Image: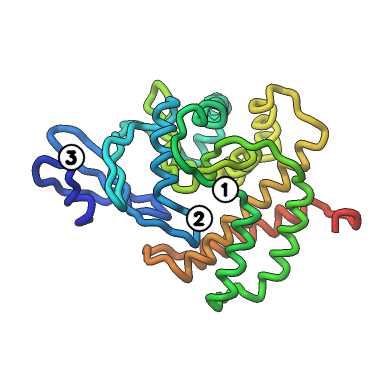
Amino acid sequence: MRIAEGLTFWSEPVTAEPLGGGLTNANFLVRHRGERFVVRVGNDIPRHHVMRFNERAAAFAAHAAGVSPRVLHQEPGALVVAFVEGQVLSPETVREEKRLERIVELIRLCHTRMIEHLRGPVLMFWPFHILRDYAASLHEGGSRFAPELPRLAAAAAKLERRIGAIDVVFCHNDLLAGNLIDDGERLWLIDWDYAGFNSPLFDLANLASNNGFTPAIEERLLSLYFGGKVDADLPARFAAMRATSLLREAMWGMVSELHSTLPIDYVAYAKEHLAKFDAAFVELDFRKGDE
């Protein structure tokens, strides 16, 4: 809180109010000269592949592309972002048919327009590299989940083979409902900690896995994004990426238990997503040729 209140951006004393919902940063609402601002406070988190130079580049590009609110100020460890008055979405509102159409268009805008505005070095967010790195961190840290690592590594290898060659676009990679805001006229996509080049399937699968999509909604999602031209192997590759998203979320929780200082029950988070991953992986029905 002291960091948020002590920024050089303020021309008079301010009071920062904590904003809930963040799993990676501490977020604050600040009122200054009759306006409201959001301050995101956080340092690099190499164990989660979160680097603030990358977040800043993505946030500036997202605003220029019309995807995200304006970044007004930056200092080491902090970003000041314009406050958006609106409805923070929930999984239930994400699943609404008309709003899903708008969300897909927002994701498409992210994938196609942000590259025109990116400047400087930015990261690649390849989930299988991250999973391998997470496994090494968990082994080195003596995680309670260490006995699970051999089977999870084997599962990840199968998933990577099934997904195969990918297209590469610039993705958000953290499509929780709470990162979407509807101001009544348009949607905003916020929080670019995990942004980076990736397969568009990851953003779609991440949206689905984070927001409880049914098979029918997933089919609609793919049809909306790909314009109704869904290749025969696309549903299987999407399902594999959906399982991958769940596994990354579970292992994110495992690593966070060892290294995060935020007051969050990361063990429960990891177990919940591991159970979801196991259920999704079983449904993929790997045959001997996939081993």
Quarter of the image holding residue 163? top right
Q: Which residue is mark 2?
A: 49
Can you say which quadrant of the picture contains the C terminus? bottom right
Mark carried by residue 174 = none
Instruction: Point out the residue furthest to the front here.
Output: 120
Q: Amino acid at mark 2?
A: His
Nearer the observer, 21 or 62: 62
**Callout 1–callout 2 Cβ contact below 8 Å:** yes
Q: Earlier in the sequence, mark 1 or mark 3?
A: 3
Q: Amino acid at mark 1?
A: Phe
Q: Position of residue 138 (x, y in %)?
A: 57, 71
| Position of residue 212 in the picture relative to residue 190 (left or right) | right
Q: Amino acid at mark 3?
A: Arg
Report crowding for label 2: few under 14, some 14 to 19, many 20 or more residues within 10 A (C-alpha). some
Q: Is residue 96 visible?
A: no
Q: Is residue 118 above or below residue 276?
A: above
Report crowding for label 1: few under 14, some 14 to 19, many 20 or more residues within 10 A (C-alpha). many
Q: Position of residue 82 (x, y in %)?
A: 29, 34
Q: Which residue is mark 3?
A: 31
Q: Residue at 19%, 48% (x, y): give it.
A: 7
Nearer the observer, 147 or 51: 51
